[in-house]
Amino acid sequence: MKTLVLAEKPSVGRDIARVLHCQQKSDGYIEGKDYVVTWGLGHLVELQDPEGYDKKYKEWKAEDLPIMPEKLLTVVIGQTSKQYRRVQTLLGRNDVKDVVIATDAGREGELVARWILQKAGCRKPCRRLWISSVTDRAIREGFANLKDAKEYENLFRAAVSRAEADWLVGINATRALTCKYNAQLSCGRVQTPTLAMIAKREEEIRRFQPQTYYTLTAEAQVRSSGGSTGAGVKSTGGASGGPVIRFQWRDGASGSYRTFAKDRADSVKQALQNGTLIITRVEKKKKKTYAPLLYDLTELQRDGSRRFGYSAKETLNIMQRLYENHKVLTYPRTDSRYLTSDIVPTLKERIDSCGVGPYKAIAAKVKNKNFTGSLPFVNNAKVSDHHAIIPTEEVPELSHMTIDERRIYDLVVRRFLAVLYPPFEYEETVLTAECAGEKIELAARGKTVLSSGWKDAYGEITEDGEEQEEDLREQILPAVAQGQRLSVRSVTCKEGKTKPPARFQEATLLSAMENPVRYMESGDRSRAKTLTETGGLGTVATRADIIDKLFGSFLMEKRGQEIYLTAKGRQLLQLVPEDLKKPEMTADWEMKLARIASGDIRRDKFMKEIRSYTLELLQEIQTQEGTYRHENMTNKKCPNCGKRLLAVNGKNAKLLVCQDRNCGYRETVSRTSNARCPVCHKRMEMSGSGADATFFCACGYRERLEKFKERRKKEGAGVTKRDVAAYMKKQQKEAAEPVNNAFAAALAGIQLDEKRK
């Protein structure tokens, strides 16, 4: 008799099969003497769509709401049905006596397995493998300490409650809004608060009133006495006299390096001119900073966006290839920046594997390090489902990677090696001075590097380190003593204006979703704590899809790297119920779900509240006074139905789409290409197709495709016919994709009743 092991993903299944000595590979599973290891492809089962309960729900009608089946049913996902049938067959085998659930150690991992087992009608004994990493040691120890699956029943109940609550609220509220206003208006517990955060930032920018401020810099010369200016210090003095120190005026009352009073700035400048400064304090402190923590997915997506302009989805897709195809990085969808203690024995092997090519020298410095004692990046308590993203024991074939894969791999490897280095150490010197005869305080700061430490892992590549105050910039300071006098050589008064908050980019939006506490209106500490502990809005695995959905639904758009709300997005936020716009809703749900998981409250009590809340939402939507108006109407008529087309900006394209959802016509006006403008070097857009294809740039430059190919060929970087054919094929494929991505599938074939047209 054998034990069936059900993993969540093929890669994890293969790791478990290797440890359990299963070597007979088959389609969808690996078998051994005592075990059969199979897997899902993520979810194999999901909640059934409304039309699965009644065919009438295919047509969206307000009078059919609410859609609230007494019992929510599950259905096998069509795209992965082949693997589900394989798992179902294995579960039914006579020689399989029991099951080990080996999906991710968390609420959603429990849901993946239990839905599969329920759908397959499995009643065989079940045990649970609960591990946070998939090293050989962790797997062996996990199988030596398997738990009875009944211990995780409450966790499963919490997971089902979350899924059903999102279904009931999302399906009903989206259909109610769409039917009432005859427009594709989707809302949900995560996407709507995300949109509201962007709206709030735009409102802050709109209301911002710039203020003029003034800063004063005094250059003071150290009177030459033939003394040393300090090790490695270059004199900044002129042809005569000693070195010069740049001091910044500081308001003694507020401690600020700026003032908003012009007369105050003028009086200080006048007092300082041709005056004498007296050093009142010389502070020297030895400081150290440790390397930034290892990457989780959100932090990696932020750096991918900030450094290379990648979208969150692009970074995730690149990571997925490095994980699944190249097998050189660990599981990407993690929310932890720490490792577990069982990973420590594998560090040397990982250093050896990634210490090739450009990383050979920096890896050699930590290759023989003894990793014992307390390590700042190891914390079992801060790892839930998966540890931080680090290199695997697989030696990379760097030449087989694309430029995008090399970039992301480089980020992860350097961050991994950096945490193994000692801290960056330096001596900071802060000088405080006063103007003789005046109560005017000035300050200057300098830094002497004692040990570059972890910064060696980055070489010439800049990496964010310790934040420093913008107004007190570092400089090389000469040796001075308390009481020493300096002659003021010049005083500069600079005028500046305060800046509004920056618009969201994908990197900063990911940060806001991860920590949405500042966007809460209630100020409730328990809710804020819950949001912080549960990872904010969405999960590391879903945030990229949520952002893409908001772009795909034309609720927000990109201008350069900045994100703007569209007219559609602004109107949706005016029409959607207030509760759905607040992060507090997620906090409230998570608090109750945690109590279900701990057995403190019953699942049916929570679901009863959700059903009542759904009815309240519908009542609010159906009775509210509001209108929806297309503000992006063009004069061009739809060739199918004759209605005027809407001009919309997709994430990487400009399109015309029919205003009638039932028609569904769309055409691509232009798409952003990778071709660079020869004048301003920005990415050009491409309009037309075939012989009429034309590149054009915002600076006014235009070029036909044929001319473009000729120019590139002369430059030695010609575009081959195969390249052009592949590019055009990609353009056509993208043009044929649904406008609203996943949301379009939900709206496909929907017909509103004639009364509402």
Image (spheres, rainbow, N blue to C red):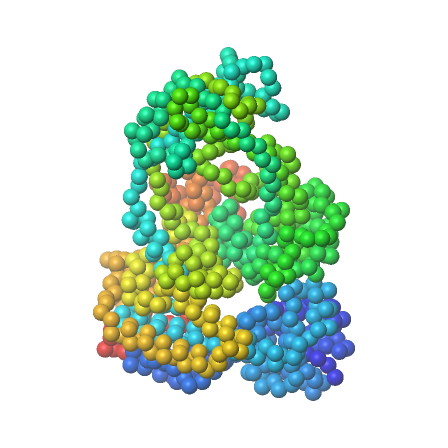
- Could one spot residue 406 in this view of the protein? no
Residue 209 seen anywhere in this rendered image of the structure: yes
Residue at 71% x, 50% y is 351
Nearer to the camera, 674 or 42: 42
Residue at image position (24%, 63%) is 629
Expressed as whole percent of the image width and height from the top left, the position of residue 110 reads 57, 74
The quarter of the picture where the C terminus appears is bottom left
Residue 744, picture quadrant: bottom left
**How many numbered marks appear?**
0
* Residue in the picture at 65% in, 85% down: 124
Q: Quadrant of residue 476?
A: top right
* Spot occupied by residue 286 in the image (x, y as percentages of width and height): 60, 36
User: Where is residue 368 shown, x and y percent of the image?
Assistant: 76, 46
The residue positioned farthest toward the top in the image shown: 240
Horizontal arrangement in the rendering, residue 520 relative to residue 637 (left or right) = right
Q: Quadrant of the N terminus?
A: bottom right
* Horizontal side of residue 450 vs 660, given as left or right: right
* Relative to 345, residue 599 above or below: below
Which residue is nearer to you in this view: 603 or 539? Answer: 603
Q: Which of the two residues, 106 or 646, is positioned nearer the viewer here? A: 106
Query: Which residue is painted at 35% across and 71% down in the image?
Result: 174
Q: x and y percent of residue 270 in the render? A: 34, 22
Image side of residue 175 versus residue 278, left or right: left
